[in-house]
Image: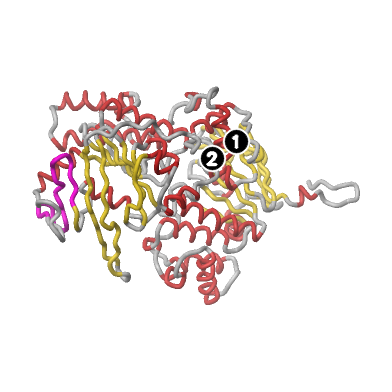
Protein backbone atom coordinates (compact mmCIF):
# COMPACT_ATOMS: atom_id res chain seq x y z
CA UNK A 1 0.00 0.00 0.00
CA UNK A 2 1.42 3.38 -1.01
CA UNK A 3 2.28 5.74 1.80
CA UNK A 4 0.88 9.30 1.60
CA UNK A 5 2.08 12.46 3.27
CA UNK A 6 -0.24 14.72 5.28
CA UNK A 7 -1.19 16.72 2.20
CA UNK A 8 -2.27 13.54 0.42
CA UNK A 9 0.70 13.32 -1.94
CA UNK A 10 2.36 9.98 -2.42
CA UNK A 11 5.67 9.53 -0.72
CA UNK A 12 8.37 10.23 -3.31
CA UNK A 13 10.28 7.21 -2.05
CA UNK A 14 7.35 4.87 -2.59
CA UNK A 15 6.39 6.41 -5.93
CA UNK A 16 9.91 5.71 -7.24
CA UNK A 17 9.81 2.08 -6.13
CA UNK A 18 10.31 -0.20 -9.16
CA UNK A 19 10.96 -3.62 -7.59
CA UNK A 20 9.60 -4.77 -4.24
CA UNK A 21 10.58 -8.22 -2.93
CA UNK A 22 9.25 -9.57 0.36
CA UNK A 23 10.00 -12.85 2.11
CA UNK A 24 10.97 -14.81 -1.03
CA UNK A 25 11.98 -18.41 -0.47
CA UNK A 26 13.17 -20.80 -3.19
CA UNK A 27 13.60 -24.57 -3.00
CA UNK A 28 15.19 -27.14 -5.30
CA UNK A 29 13.54 -30.47 -4.74
CA UNK A 30 12.89 -30.51 -1.02
CA UNK A 31 15.85 -28.29 -0.07
CA UNK A 32 15.38 -24.58 0.57
CA UNK A 33 18.24 -22.57 -0.94
CA UNK A 34 16.93 -18.99 -0.61
CA UNK A 35 15.52 -17.95 2.75
CA UNK A 36 13.19 -14.96 3.06
CA UNK A 37 14.74 -12.30 0.82
CA UNK A 38 13.55 -8.68 1.18
CA UNK A 39 14.72 -6.16 -1.41
CA UNK A 40 13.66 -2.78 -2.80
CA UNK A 41 15.06 -1.08 -5.92
CA UNK A 42 14.04 2.43 -6.93
CA UNK A 43 13.94 4.21 -10.25
CA UNK A 44 17.42 5.04 -11.58
CA UNK A 45 19.13 2.99 -8.86
CA UNK A 46 21.78 0.31 -9.46
CA UNK A 47 21.82 -2.38 -6.76
CA UNK A 48 24.58 -5.01 -6.80
CA UNK A 49 24.03 -8.42 -5.21
CA UNK A 50 27.35 -10.06 -4.32
CA UNK A 51 28.33 -13.35 -2.71
CA UNK A 52 30.07 -16.65 -3.27
CA UNK A 53 28.95 -19.25 -5.76
CA UNK A 54 25.98 -20.99 -4.15
CA UNK A 55 24.99 -17.95 -2.09
CA UNK A 56 21.62 -17.75 -3.89
CA UNK A 57 22.14 -14.49 -5.77
CA UNK A 58 21.48 -15.87 -9.29
CA UNK A 59 18.69 -18.12 -8.02
CA UNK A 60 16.95 -15.07 -6.56
CA UNK A 61 17.25 -13.18 -9.86
CA UNK A 62 15.93 -16.15 -11.86
CA UNK A 63 13.02 -16.62 -9.44
CA UNK A 64 11.86 -13.05 -10.10
CA UNK A 65 11.66 -13.79 -13.83
CA UNK A 66 10.15 -17.27 -13.63
CA UNK A 67 13.38 -18.76 -15.03
CA UNK A 68 14.15 -21.35 -12.35
CA UNK A 69 15.22 -24.85 -13.36
CA UNK A 70 12.51 -27.50 -13.66
CA UNK A 71 13.04 -28.71 -10.09
CA UNK A 72 13.07 -25.21 -8.60
CA UNK A 73 10.07 -23.33 -7.22
CA UNK A 74 9.24 -20.30 -5.13
CA UNK A 75 7.76 -21.61 -1.88
CA UNK A 76 6.95 -18.30 -0.16
CA UNK A 77 7.00 -14.55 -0.59
CA UNK A 78 6.05 -11.97 -3.19
CA UNK A 79 7.65 -9.72 -5.77
CA UNK A 80 6.08 -6.83 -7.65
CA UNK A 81 7.31 -4.68 -10.54
CA UNK A 82 5.73 -1.26 -10.28
CA UNK A 83 2.69 -2.81 -8.61
CA UNK A 84 2.38 -5.76 -11.04
CA UNK A 85 3.18 -9.13 -9.57
CA UNK A 86 6.16 -11.10 -10.81
CA UNK A 87 6.09 -14.08 -8.48
CA UNK A 88 2.82 -15.92 -8.99
CA UNK A 89 2.18 -14.43 -12.43
CA UNK A 90 1.05 -16.83 -15.15
CA UNK A 91 3.14 -17.65 -18.22
CA UNK A 92 1.22 -15.25 -20.44
CA UNK A 93 1.62 -12.40 -17.98
CA UNK A 94 5.34 -13.12 -17.51
CA UNK A 95 5.90 -13.28 -21.26
CA UNK A 96 4.40 -9.79 -21.55
CA UNK A 97 6.53 -8.40 -18.70
CA UNK A 98 9.79 -10.00 -19.80
CA UNK A 99 11.41 -7.85 -22.43
CA UNK A 100 8.86 -5.02 -22.22
CA UNK A 101 9.03 -4.02 -18.54
CA UNK A 102 11.98 -6.08 -17.31
CA UNK A 103 15.07 -6.90 -19.35
CA UNK A 104 17.48 -9.73 -18.62
CA UNK A 105 21.19 -9.93 -19.46
CA UNK A 106 22.41 -13.54 -18.94
CA UNK A 107 25.89 -14.43 -17.77
CA UNK A 108 27.30 -16.38 -20.70
CA UNK A 109 27.44 -14.47 -24.00
CA UNK A 110 28.29 -17.76 -25.72
CA UNK A 111 24.97 -19.40 -24.84
CA UNK A 112 22.72 -16.37 -24.38
CA UNK A 113 22.01 -15.99 -28.11
CA UNK A 114 20.42 -18.38 -30.62
CA UNK A 115 23.39 -19.64 -32.67
CA UNK A 116 21.31 -20.28 -35.81
CA UNK A 117 19.49 -16.93 -35.92
CA UNK A 118 21.04 -13.73 -37.23
CA UNK A 119 21.93 -11.13 -34.64
CA UNK A 120 19.69 -8.44 -36.11
CA UNK A 121 16.71 -10.80 -36.21
CA UNK A 122 17.11 -11.60 -32.52
CA UNK A 123 16.97 -7.91 -31.58
CA UNK A 124 14.09 -7.25 -33.99
CA UNK A 125 12.10 -10.15 -32.51
CA UNK A 126 11.84 -8.41 -29.14
CA UNK A 127 10.51 -5.23 -30.75
CA UNK A 128 7.97 -7.11 -32.89
CA UNK A 129 6.70 -9.36 -30.07
CA UNK A 130 6.02 -6.38 -27.83
CA UNK A 131 4.49 -4.26 -30.57
CA UNK A 132 7.26 -1.67 -30.62
CA UNK A 133 7.92 -1.91 -34.38
CA UNK A 134 6.75 -3.50 -37.61
CA UNK A 135 8.85 -6.23 -39.20
CA UNK A 136 10.49 -3.77 -41.61
CA UNK A 137 10.91 -1.09 -38.98
CA UNK A 138 12.33 -3.60 -36.48
CA UNK A 139 15.18 -4.44 -38.84
CA UNK A 140 16.18 -0.77 -39.02
CA UNK A 141 15.81 -0.42 -35.25
CA UNK A 142 18.04 -3.46 -34.70
CA UNK A 143 20.86 -1.78 -36.62
CA UNK A 144 20.35 1.42 -34.61
CA UNK A 145 20.44 -0.51 -31.32
CA UNK A 146 23.66 -2.25 -32.37
CA UNK A 147 25.19 1.12 -33.21
CA UNK A 148 24.12 2.55 -29.84
CA UNK A 149 25.66 -0.50 -28.17
CA UNK A 150 29.01 0.40 -29.72
CA UNK A 151 29.15 -2.63 -32.02
CA UNK A 152 31.40 -1.88 -34.99
CA UNK A 153 29.88 -2.11 -38.49
CA UNK A 154 26.32 -2.59 -37.20
CA UNK A 155 24.91 -3.18 -40.71
CA UNK A 156 27.27 -6.13 -41.16
CA UNK A 157 26.89 -7.46 -37.61
CA UNK A 158 23.10 -7.48 -37.90
CA UNK A 159 23.42 -9.97 -40.78
CA UNK A 160 25.91 -12.19 -38.97
CA UNK A 161 25.35 -15.14 -36.66
CA UNK A 162 26.54 -14.97 -33.01
CA UNK A 163 29.48 -17.28 -33.69
CA UNK A 164 31.08 -14.61 -35.86
CA UNK A 165 31.16 -12.11 -32.97
CA UNK A 166 33.58 -11.82 -30.07
CA UNK A 167 32.46 -12.32 -26.48
CA UNK A 168 32.34 -8.57 -25.89
CA UNK A 169 30.29 -7.99 -29.03
CA UNK A 170 27.84 -10.74 -28.08
CA UNK A 171 27.44 -9.23 -24.63
CA UNK A 172 26.62 -5.86 -26.22
CA UNK A 173 23.97 -7.58 -28.33
CA UNK A 174 22.45 -9.11 -25.18
CA UNK A 175 22.35 -5.69 -23.50
CA UNK A 176 20.73 -4.31 -26.64
CA UNK A 177 18.04 -6.99 -26.48
CA UNK A 178 17.48 -6.41 -22.75
CA UNK A 179 17.10 -2.64 -23.15
CA UNK A 180 15.40 -2.52 -26.59
CA UNK A 181 11.95 -1.76 -25.12
CA UNK A 182 13.35 0.63 -22.49
CA UNK A 183 12.16 -1.51 -19.56
CA UNK A 184 11.64 -0.30 -16.00
CA UNK A 185 14.07 -2.88 -14.60
CA UNK A 186 17.17 -4.57 -16.01
CA UNK A 187 18.48 -7.72 -14.30
CA UNK A 188 22.11 -8.40 -15.28
CA UNK A 189 23.48 -11.76 -14.13
CA UNK A 190 27.31 -11.66 -14.10
CA UNK A 191 27.34 -9.74 -17.41
CA UNK A 192 31.13 -9.26 -17.57
CA UNK A 193 32.67 -12.16 -15.63
CA UNK A 194 34.48 -13.62 -18.66
CA UNK A 195 35.55 -10.32 -20.28
CA UNK A 196 38.86 -8.50 -20.07
CA UNK A 197 39.05 -5.20 -18.21
CA UNK A 198 38.83 -2.86 -21.20
CA UNK A 199 35.88 -4.69 -22.77
CA UNK A 200 34.32 -4.99 -19.31
CA UNK A 201 34.59 -1.23 -18.82
CA UNK A 202 33.00 -0.51 -22.20
CA UNK A 203 30.16 -2.97 -21.56
CA UNK A 204 29.42 -1.56 -18.10
CA UNK A 205 29.69 2.01 -19.38
CA UNK A 206 27.16 1.19 -22.09
CA UNK A 207 24.78 -0.54 -19.67
CA UNK A 208 24.99 2.34 -17.21
CA UNK A 209 24.45 4.97 -19.91
CA UNK A 210 21.40 3.11 -21.24
CA UNK A 211 19.71 2.79 -17.86
CA UNK A 212 20.64 6.27 -16.63
CA UNK A 213 19.17 7.77 -19.80
CA UNK A 214 15.86 5.96 -19.40
CA UNK A 215 15.73 6.03 -15.60
CA UNK A 216 15.55 2.25 -15.38
CA UNK A 217 16.52 0.39 -12.22
CA UNK A 218 19.26 -2.29 -12.34
CA UNK A 219 19.74 -5.45 -10.32
CA UNK A 220 23.38 -6.36 -10.95
CA UNK A 221 24.38 -9.87 -9.88
CA UNK A 222 28.16 -10.20 -9.61
CA UNK A 223 30.93 -11.95 -7.72
CA UNK A 224 33.33 -9.12 -8.62
CA UNK A 225 33.46 -6.78 -5.65
CA UNK A 226 35.44 -4.22 -7.64
CA UNK A 227 32.65 -4.02 -10.23
CA UNK A 228 30.07 -3.64 -7.46
CA UNK A 229 32.10 -0.91 -5.77
CA UNK A 230 32.62 0.91 -9.06
CA UNK A 231 29.09 0.76 -10.47
CA UNK A 232 26.42 0.26 -7.81
CA UNK A 233 24.58 2.74 -5.61
CA UNK A 234 23.87 0.04 -3.03
CA UNK A 235 25.42 -3.36 -2.26
CA UNK A 236 23.53 -6.42 -0.99
CA UNK A 237 25.70 -9.25 0.37
CA UNK A 238 24.28 -12.79 0.29
CA UNK A 239 25.48 -15.93 2.05
CA UNK A 240 23.78 -19.34 2.15
CA UNK A 241 20.59 -17.95 0.63
CA UNK A 242 20.26 -15.04 3.08
CA UNK A 243 21.03 -11.33 2.95
CA UNK A 244 23.65 -10.75 5.64
CA UNK A 245 24.45 -7.10 4.94
CA UNK A 246 23.21 -4.23 2.80
CA UNK A 247 24.17 -0.60 2.53
CA UNK A 248 25.47 2.20 0.35
CA UNK A 249 28.44 1.29 -1.83
CA UNK A 250 30.48 4.00 -0.16
CA UNK A 251 29.87 2.44 3.26
CA UNK A 252 30.01 -1.35 2.92
CA UNK A 253 33.63 -1.79 1.68
CA UNK A 254 34.91 0.93 4.00
CA UNK A 255 33.17 -0.34 7.15
CA UNK A 256 31.78 -3.89 6.67
CA UNK A 257 29.60 -5.00 9.55
CA UNK A 258 29.31 -8.73 8.91
CA UNK A 259 32.14 -11.23 9.29
CA UNK A 260 31.32 -12.77 5.91
CA UNK A 261 31.55 -9.40 4.13
CA UNK A 262 34.96 -8.82 5.70
CA UNK A 263 36.11 -12.25 4.52
CA UNK A 264 34.91 -11.60 0.96
CA UNK A 265 36.76 -8.29 0.89
CA UNK A 266 39.90 -9.89 2.31
CA UNK A 267 39.82 -12.59 -0.38
CA UNK A 268 39.43 -10.16 -3.29
CA UNK A 269 42.66 -9.61 -5.25
CA UNK A 270 43.44 -5.92 -5.12
CA UNK A 271 46.04 -3.49 -6.31
CA UNK A 272 46.65 -2.66 -2.67
CA UNK A 273 48.45 -6.01 -2.61
CA UNK A 274 52.11 -5.65 -3.33
CA UNK A 275 53.56 -7.71 -6.13
CA UNK A 276 55.22 -10.91 -4.87
CA UNK A 277 58.75 -10.50 -3.54
CA UNK A 278 61.13 -10.59 -6.48
CA UNK A 279 62.62 -14.05 -6.94
CA UNK A 280 65.88 -14.41 -8.85
CA UNK A 281 65.35 -15.90 -12.33
CA UNK A 282 66.48 -19.48 -12.84
CA UNK A 283 67.44 -21.32 -15.99
CA UNK A 284 65.21 -20.69 -19.00
CA UNK A 285 62.83 -23.62 -19.46
CA UNK A 286 60.24 -22.73 -22.11
CA UNK A 287 61.37 -20.23 -24.74
CA UNK A 288 59.19 -18.70 -27.45
CA UNK A 289 61.23 -16.82 -30.05
CA UNK A 290 59.83 -14.73 -32.92
CA UNK A 291 56.68 -16.85 -33.17
CA UNK A 292 53.92 -15.69 -35.55
CA UNK A 293 50.55 -17.08 -36.60
CA UNK A 294 48.06 -15.91 -39.26
CA UNK A 295 44.53 -17.22 -39.81
CA UNK A 296 42.29 -16.94 -42.83
CA UNK A 297 38.80 -15.69 -41.94
CA UNK A 298 35.91 -16.04 -44.37
CA UNK A 299 34.84 -12.69 -45.76
CA UNK A 300 37.73 -10.87 -44.09
CA UNK A 301 40.92 -12.43 -45.47
CA UNK A 302 44.10 -13.01 -43.49
CA UNK A 303 44.20 -11.99 -39.84
CA UNK A 304 47.50 -11.87 -37.96
CA UNK A 305 46.62 -13.41 -34.57
CA UNK A 306 50.24 -13.39 -33.37
CA UNK A 307 52.93 -11.19 -34.86
CA UNK A 308 56.59 -12.06 -34.18
CA UNK A 309 56.67 -12.41 -30.39
CA UNK A 310 59.15 -13.74 -27.84
CA UNK A 311 58.98 -14.66 -24.15
CA UNK A 312 60.68 -16.95 -21.64
CA UNK A 313 59.30 -19.08 -18.81
CA UNK A 314 61.86 -19.95 -16.13
CA UNK A 315 61.98 -23.15 -14.11
CA UNK A 316 59.84 -22.91 -10.96
CA UNK A 317 58.63 -19.42 -11.87
CA UNK A 318 55.44 -17.84 -13.28
CA UNK A 319 55.30 -15.79 -16.47
CA UNK A 320 51.92 -14.17 -17.09
CA UNK A 321 50.51 -13.15 -20.45
CA UNK A 322 47.90 -10.39 -20.35
CA UNK A 323 45.94 -8.41 -22.91
CA UNK A 324 42.51 -7.71 -24.31
CA UNK A 325 40.28 -10.29 -25.94
CA UNK A 326 41.69 -10.86 -29.42
CA UNK A 327 45.19 -9.73 -28.46
CA UNK A 328 46.63 -13.15 -29.36
CA UNK A 329 47.54 -14.35 -25.88
CA UNK A 330 45.55 -17.62 -26.02
CA UNK A 331 46.84 -18.41 -29.53
CA UNK A 332 50.41 -17.89 -28.34
CA UNK A 333 49.76 -20.13 -25.33
CA UNK A 334 48.26 -22.86 -27.55
CA UNK A 335 51.34 -22.73 -29.77
CA UNK A 336 53.52 -23.24 -26.69
CA UNK A 337 51.50 -26.35 -25.72
CA UNK A 338 51.65 -27.76 -29.23
CA UNK A 339 47.92 -27.45 -29.91
CA UNK A 340 48.36 -24.77 -32.58
CA UNK A 341 50.99 -24.49 -35.28
CA UNK A 342 53.23 -21.48 -35.78
CA UNK A 343 53.85 -20.03 -39.22
CA UNK A 344 57.33 -18.96 -38.22
CA UNK A 345 59.61 -18.75 -35.21
CA UNK A 346 60.69 -21.44 -32.79
CA UNK A 347 59.57 -22.80 -29.40
CA UNK A 348 62.01 -24.75 -27.24
CA UNK A 349 61.78 -26.65 -23.96
CA UNK A 350 65.29 -26.76 -22.62
CA UNK A 351 67.25 -27.87 -25.67
CA UNK A 352 64.30 -29.64 -27.32
CA UNK A 353 62.60 -27.88 -30.26
CA UNK A 354 58.79 -28.03 -30.39
CA UNK A 355 57.52 -30.36 -33.11
CA UNK A 356 55.38 -28.32 -35.49
CA UNK A 357 52.10 -30.04 -36.41
CA UNK A 358 50.92 -27.68 -39.16
CA UNK A 359 47.86 -28.95 -40.99
CA UNK A 360 47.03 -32.44 -42.11
CA UNK A 361 46.26 -35.82 -40.55
CA UNK A 362 47.94 -36.97 -37.37
CA UNK A 363 51.42 -38.31 -38.13
CA UNK A 364 52.02 -36.02 -41.12
CA UNK A 365 53.39 -32.96 -39.41
CA UNK A 366 54.36 -29.94 -41.44
CA UNK A 367 54.22 -26.14 -41.25
CA UNK A 368 53.93 -23.26 -43.68
CA UNK A 369 57.56 -22.47 -42.91
CA UNK A 370 59.84 -24.87 -41.05
CA UNK A 371 59.78 -24.21 -37.31
CA UNK A 372 62.90 -25.96 -36.16
CA UNK A 373 63.19 -29.55 -37.37
CA UNK A 374 59.97 -31.32 -38.38
CA UNK A 375 59.23 -34.11 -35.94
CA UNK A 376 57.02 -37.15 -35.65
CA UNK A 377 53.75 -37.66 -33.82
CA UNK A 378 55.54 -39.60 -31.09
CA UNK A 379 57.89 -36.68 -30.51
CA UNK A 380 54.93 -34.33 -30.24
CA UNK A 381 53.39 -36.67 -27.63
CA UNK A 382 56.62 -36.50 -25.66
CA UNK A 383 56.42 -32.69 -25.75
CA UNK A 384 52.85 -32.68 -24.50
CA UNK A 385 53.81 -34.91 -21.60
CA UNK A 386 56.18 -32.19 -20.42
CA UNK A 387 53.87 -29.23 -21.17
CA UNK A 388 50.30 -29.50 -19.88
CA UNK A 389 47.26 -27.22 -20.18
CA UNK A 390 44.51 -26.18 -17.74
CA UNK A 391 41.49 -24.75 -19.56
CA UNK A 392 39.45 -21.71 -18.55
CA UNK A 393 36.02 -23.24 -17.99
CA UNK A 394 35.93 -25.76 -15.11
CA UNK A 395 32.43 -26.84 -16.18
CA UNK A 396 33.35 -27.77 -19.78
CA UNK A 397 36.89 -29.09 -19.24
CA UNK A 398 35.98 -32.43 -17.62
CA UNK A 399 34.22 -35.41 -19.20
CA UNK A 400 30.85 -35.53 -17.39
CA UNK A 401 30.47 -39.30 -17.88
CA UNK A 402 33.72 -40.25 -16.11
CA UNK A 403 34.51 -40.49 -12.41
CA UNK A 404 37.08 -38.11 -10.96
CA UNK A 405 39.48 -41.04 -10.57
CA UNK A 406 39.29 -41.89 -14.28
CA UNK A 407 39.62 -38.23 -15.31
CA UNK A 408 42.83 -37.74 -13.31
CA UNK A 409 44.17 -41.20 -14.24
CA UNK A 410 43.57 -40.76 -17.99
CA UNK A 411 46.97 -39.14 -18.77
CA UNK A 412 48.75 -41.96 -16.91
CA UNK A 413 46.80 -44.50 -18.97
CA UNK A 414 47.55 -42.66 -22.22
CA UNK A 415 51.29 -42.62 -21.59
CA UNK A 416 51.42 -46.10 -20.03
CA UNK A 417 52.95 -44.91 -16.78
CA UNK A 418 53.06 -47.58 -14.03
CA UNK A 419 50.72 -50.50 -13.51
CA UNK A 420 47.09 -50.24 -12.40
CA UNK A 421 47.97 -50.25 -8.70
CA UNK A 422 50.63 -47.56 -9.16
CA UNK A 423 48.22 -45.37 -11.12
CA UNK A 424 45.51 -45.66 -8.49
CA UNK A 425 47.96 -44.67 -5.76
CA UNK A 426 49.30 -41.77 -7.86
CA UNK A 427 45.80 -40.41 -8.48
CA UNK A 428 44.91 -40.60 -4.78
CA UNK A 429 48.14 -38.78 -3.87
CA UNK A 430 47.41 -36.15 -6.50
CA UNK A 431 43.99 -35.45 -4.98
CA UNK A 432 45.70 -34.99 -1.62
CA UNK A 433 48.03 -32.42 -3.21
CA UNK A 434 45.14 -30.36 -4.59
CA UNK A 435 43.34 -30.56 -1.23
CA UNK A 436 40.39 -32.72 -2.31
CA UNK A 437 39.18 -35.60 -0.12
CA UNK A 438 39.73 -39.07 -1.53
CA UNK A 439 36.01 -39.77 -1.33
CA UNK A 440 35.74 -37.58 -4.44
CA UNK A 441 37.42 -40.32 -6.51
CA UNK A 442 34.06 -42.01 -7.09
CA UNK A 443 32.16 -38.81 -7.84
CA UNK A 444 31.43 -37.30 -11.24
CA UNK A 445 31.98 -33.64 -12.26
CA UNK A 446 28.29 -32.74 -11.86
CA UNK A 447 28.60 -33.48 -8.13
CA UNK A 448 31.39 -30.90 -7.67
CA UNK A 449 31.42 -27.10 -7.46
CA UNK A 450 33.31 -24.92 -9.93
CA UNK A 451 36.27 -24.55 -7.58
CA UNK A 452 36.42 -28.28 -6.94
CA UNK A 453 36.28 -29.00 -10.67
CA UNK A 454 39.16 -26.63 -11.30
CA UNK A 455 41.19 -28.47 -8.66
CA UNK A 456 40.48 -31.71 -10.54
CA UNK A 457 41.63 -30.08 -13.81
CA UNK A 458 44.85 -28.95 -12.10
CA UNK A 459 45.38 -32.45 -10.67
CA UNK A 460 44.92 -33.94 -14.14
CA UNK A 461 47.50 -31.55 -15.60
CA UNK A 462 50.05 -32.22 -12.83
CA UNK A 463 49.68 -35.98 -12.54
CA UNK A 464 52.33 -36.46 -15.26
CA UNK A 465 54.75 -34.25 -13.31
CA UNK A 466 55.21 -31.84 -16.27
CA UNK A 467 57.90 -29.20 -16.43
CA UNK A 468 55.47 -26.46 -17.51
CA UNK A 469 51.73 -25.92 -17.00
CA UNK A 470 49.93 -23.44 -19.23
CA UNK A 471 46.94 -21.99 -17.35
CA UNK A 472 44.41 -20.31 -19.64
CA UNK A 473 42.22 -18.01 -17.52
CA UNK A 474 42.02 -20.65 -14.74
CA UNK A 475 40.13 -18.52 -12.20
CA UNK A 476 38.09 -16.05 -14.28
CA UNK A 477 34.85 -18.03 -13.86
CA UNK A 478 35.23 -18.40 -10.08
CA UNK A 479 34.08 -16.14 -7.25
CA UNK A 480 36.68 -14.31 -5.18
CA UNK A 481 36.96 -16.71 -2.25
CA UNK A 482 37.26 -19.82 -4.45
CA UNK A 483 39.59 -17.89 -6.74
CA UNK A 484 41.83 -17.06 -3.77
CA UNK A 485 42.02 -20.72 -2.72
CA UNK A 486 42.93 -21.83 -6.27
CA UNK A 487 45.68 -19.21 -6.47
CA UNK A 488 47.03 -20.30 -3.08
CA UNK A 489 46.96 -23.89 -4.31
CA UNK A 490 48.91 -23.01 -7.47
CA UNK A 491 51.52 -21.19 -5.39
CA UNK A 492 51.91 -24.16 -3.02
CA UNK A 493 52.15 -26.68 -5.87
CA UNK A 494 54.80 -24.60 -7.62
CA UNK A 495 56.86 -24.53 -4.44
CA UNK A 496 56.46 -28.28 -3.82
CA UNK A 497 56.83 -29.54 -7.41
CA UNK A 498 59.14 -26.88 -8.88
CA UNK A 499 56.77 -26.52 -11.83
CA UNK A 500 56.80 -23.49 -14.14
CA UNK A 501 53.59 -21.67 -15.12
CA UNK A 502 52.61 -19.74 -18.22
CA UNK A 503 49.58 -17.94 -16.80
CA UNK A 504 47.12 -16.38 -19.28
CA UNK A 505 44.66 -13.93 -17.74
CA UNK A 506 42.76 -10.69 -18.27
CA UNK A 507 42.51 -10.06 -14.50
CA UNK A 508 45.38 -7.70 -13.73
CA UNK A 509 44.96 -7.91 -9.95
CA UNK A 510 45.31 -11.71 -10.12
CA UNK A 511 48.30 -11.42 -12.46
CA UNK A 512 50.01 -8.96 -10.12
CA UNK A 513 49.61 -11.33 -7.22
CA UNK A 514 50.90 -14.55 -8.80
CA UNK A 515 53.52 -13.46 -11.35
CA UNK A 516 57.27 -13.23 -11.39
CA UNK A 517 57.34 -11.73 -14.89
CA UNK A 518 54.58 -10.26 -17.04
CA UNK A 519 54.24 -9.92 -20.81
CA UNK A 520 51.57 -7.55 -22.18
CA UNK A 521 50.07 -8.31 -25.62
CA UNK A 522 48.28 -5.93 -27.95
CA UNK A 523 47.05 -6.76 -31.45
CA UNK A 524 49.24 -9.88 -31.61
CA UNK A 525 52.43 -8.25 -30.35
CA UNK A 526 54.13 -8.23 -26.96
CA UNK A 527 54.43 -4.51 -26.27
CA UNK A 528 55.96 -4.69 -22.79
CA UNK A 529 57.47 -7.29 -20.48
CA UNK A 530 59.41 -7.33 -17.26
CA UNK A 531 59.05 -8.13 -13.59
CA UNK A 532 55.55 -7.87 -12.13
CA UNK A 533 56.60 -4.93 -9.95
CA UNK A 534 58.16 -3.07 -12.88
CA UNK A 535 55.22 -3.58 -15.26
CA UNK A 536 52.52 -2.63 -12.76
CA UNK A 537 54.30 0.08 -10.78
CA UNK A 538 56.12 1.77 -13.65
CA UNK A 539 54.50 0.75 -16.97
CA UNK A 540 56.36 1.98 -20.03
CA UNK A 541 53.85 1.23 -22.81
CA UNK A 542 50.79 3.43 -23.21
CA UNK A 543 48.69 0.31 -23.78
CA UNK A 544 49.75 -1.09 -20.39
CA UNK A 545 48.77 2.20 -18.76
CA UNK A 546 45.39 2.04 -20.53
CA UNK A 547 44.80 -1.50 -19.24
CA UNK A 548 45.59 -0.45 -15.69
CA UNK A 549 43.31 2.58 -15.98
CA UNK A 550 40.42 0.33 -17.04
CA UNK A 551 40.55 -1.84 -13.90
CA UNK A 552 37.24 -1.43 -11.99
CA UNK A 553 37.51 1.08 -9.14
CA UNK A 554 38.73 -0.67 -6.00
CA UNK A 555 39.25 2.36 -3.82
CA UNK A 556 36.89 1.13 -1.10
CA UNK A 557 38.28 -2.38 -1.21
CA UNK A 558 41.85 -1.12 -1.10
CA UNK A 559 41.03 1.16 1.84
CA UNK A 560 39.59 -1.80 3.69
CA UNK A 561 42.61 -3.95 2.85
CA UNK A 562 45.02 -1.32 4.12
CA UNK A 563 43.05 -0.76 7.31
CA UNK A 564 42.66 -4.44 8.06
CA UNK A 565 46.01 -5.77 6.84
CA UNK A 566 47.21 -6.43 10.39
CA UNK A 567 43.93 -7.65 11.85
CA UNK A 568 42.08 -9.70 9.21
CA UNK A 569 44.04 -12.55 7.64
CA UNK A 570 43.44 -12.80 3.93
CA UNK A 571 41.40 -15.80 2.72
CA UNK A 572 39.95 -16.71 6.08
CA UNK A 573 38.70 -20.29 6.48
CA UNK A 574 35.26 -19.09 7.65
CA UNK A 575 34.09 -19.13 4.03
CA UNK A 576 33.93 -22.90 4.18
CA UNK A 577 34.59 -25.38 1.40
CA UNK A 578 34.48 -24.58 -2.30
CA UNK A 579 31.18 -26.42 -2.44
Labels 1 & 2 near each other (Cβ < 8 A): yes
Side of 153 relative to 56 (left or right): left
Residue at image point 53% right, 27% down: 565
Question: Which residue is under mark 1?
Answer: 253
Determine if the magenta segment contains residue 351.
yes
Q: Is residue 372 visible?
A: yes
Instruction: Looking at this view, name the residue that lies furthest to the right.
Output: 7
Residue beneath disc 2: 225
Relative to 136, residue 169 above or below: above
Disc 1 is placed on an element classified as loop
Left or right placement of residue 463 versus residue 128 in this view: left
Q: Which residues are magenta?
A: 346-365
Tell which residue pokes out farthest to the bottom in this image: 136
Residue 208 % position (x, y): 59, 55
Report the coloring of the rendering: secondary structure
Which comes sooner in the sequence, label 1 or label 2? Answer: 2
**Frontmost residue, 199 versus 371:** 371
Q: Is residue 173 above or below residue 415?
A: below
- Relative to 164, 341 lies left or right: left
Q: Main secondary structure of the magenta part?
A: loop
Amino acid sequence: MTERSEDGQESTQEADLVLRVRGVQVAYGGRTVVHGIDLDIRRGEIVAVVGESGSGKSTTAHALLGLLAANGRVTAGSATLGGERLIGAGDQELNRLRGERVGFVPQDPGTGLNPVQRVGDQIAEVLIVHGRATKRGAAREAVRILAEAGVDRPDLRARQYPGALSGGQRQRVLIGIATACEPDLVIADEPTSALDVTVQKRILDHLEQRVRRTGAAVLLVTHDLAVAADRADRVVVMKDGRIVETGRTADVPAAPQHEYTRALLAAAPSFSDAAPPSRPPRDALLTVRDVARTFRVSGVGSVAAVRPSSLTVHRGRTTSLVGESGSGKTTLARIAVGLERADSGVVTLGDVVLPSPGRGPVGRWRSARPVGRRRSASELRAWRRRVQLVHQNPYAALNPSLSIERIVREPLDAFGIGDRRDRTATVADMLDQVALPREFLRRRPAELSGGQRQRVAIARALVLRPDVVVLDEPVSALDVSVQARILDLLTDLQRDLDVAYLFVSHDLAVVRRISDTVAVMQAGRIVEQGSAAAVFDDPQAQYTRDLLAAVPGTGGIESFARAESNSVPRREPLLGSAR
